[in-house]
Image: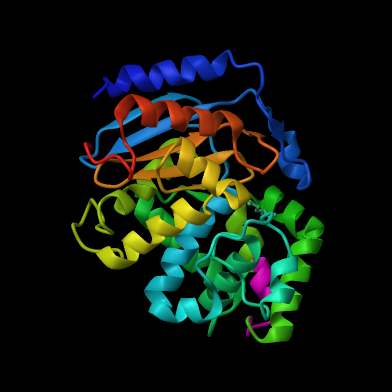
Amino acid sequence: MADLAMLVANIAARAATATDRGRVADYIPELAKVSAGHFGIAVVTAAGEEFAAGDADMRFSIQSVSKVFALVEASCRHGDAVWTMVGREPSGSAFNSIIQLELEGGRPRNPFINAGAIAVCDLIAQGKDSAEAIAAIMARIRDLAGDDSIDIDPAVAWSESVTGFRNAALANYMRSFGVIAGPVDATLSVYFQQCAIAMSCRQLARAGRFLALGGVAPDTGLPVISAERTRRINALMLTCGHYDASGDFAFRVGLPAKSGVGGGILAIAPGRASIAVWSPGLSPQGNSLLGTRALEQLAQATGWSVFNPDV
Ligand code: GLU
């Protein structure tokens, strides 16, 4: 296997000189302020070694990467009841599409498109107010990353809430079918704040490490979630983690991964490593252009892939 330190440094050096960097998301005004010039990468191995390069310690808006941690939180609280509200199929549509909801009785295709993530937030908020629900998600992420400094960027949360008309439409639509049970405003508040969590690549890679370890928290040796649920979450990341480019990502990289429109991607090489990349310029489907390319280079050089029998 390639020398990881050198590999990570080389990947960052290549990204630094890239001229086609994609387009920074601008439909959430606060995200448009971030320069497309950034690139960061952090690899935390299953054994706990860390390799990082570029802007690996700069915090960015994790956006939809948060949907993985919210799903973990909901699974811990509600177990398989999550799947009565949310499906497990790739959507083949944009992350904020409403069309499928109408055709499929208001039940979102999977927990990683916006509708599904809003339904997951509603589950977490059951029996709580929105402040308690977001506090539970934050506590989970801080615990997994071993870092109490992780927080929500209030400017991004505000920007989302004043422009999130389509998310409000999705939530109201699901409420009309009874897929969402709680007050729509409270559920949306949890969702907008969750999307606005700011983390660095290093923090994100640390937080995802349990997914490379069969659900076991590396510091305590205790299960965060069962090995079976971990396998299922990794399966969903592989099949649904990149919106309607999930097939292309599996083809090119072959690892479970979740992207966000802030330009971050968390990827899991089961038994090997947790990897986070960040570059704010996006592909037309909303996935980090250089981040995807970096993961492709890493997977090729290391052989890490859930489809590779030799690793
Ligand atoms: N907060 C974003 C939205 O709801 C998240 C989108 C994403 O990262 O996929 O539109």
Residue 160 part of the magenta segment? no
* Left or right relative to 116: residue 170: right
How many numbered badges does the structure rendering display?
0
Q: In which quarter of the image is the N terminus?
A: top left
* Left or right relative to 234: residue 135: right
Residue 165, placed above or below residue 53:
below
Residue 18, placed above or below residue 239:
above
Residue 186 part of the magenta segment? yes
**In this view of the protein, which residue sits in the foreground, 241 or 205?**
241
**In this view of the protein, which residue sits in the foreground, 185 or 208?**
208
Determine if residue 259 is in view. Answer: no
**In this view of the protein, which residue sits in the foreground, 310 or 70?**
310
How is the rendered protein coloured?
Answer: rainbow
> Which secondary structure class fits the magenta region best?
helix
The percent position of residue 269, horizontal first and vertical second, equals: 33, 43
Q: What residue is shown at x 66% (from left), y 60% (from top)?
A: 192
Q: What residue is shown at x 44% (from left), y 20% (from top)?
A: 11
The percent position of residue 65, horizontal first and vertical second, equals: 53, 51
Q: What residue is shown at x 32% (from left), y 47% (from top)?
A: 209
The percent position of residue 132, horizontal first and vertical second, equals: 53, 73
Q: Magenta segment, which residues?
A: 180-189
The percent position of residue 179, horizontal first and vertical second, equals: 63, 82
Q: What residue is shown at x 63% (from left), y 56% (from top)?
A: 92
Residue 18, placed above or below residue 130:
above
Q: In which quarter of the image is the C terminus?
A: top left
Determine if residue 244 is in view. Answer: yes
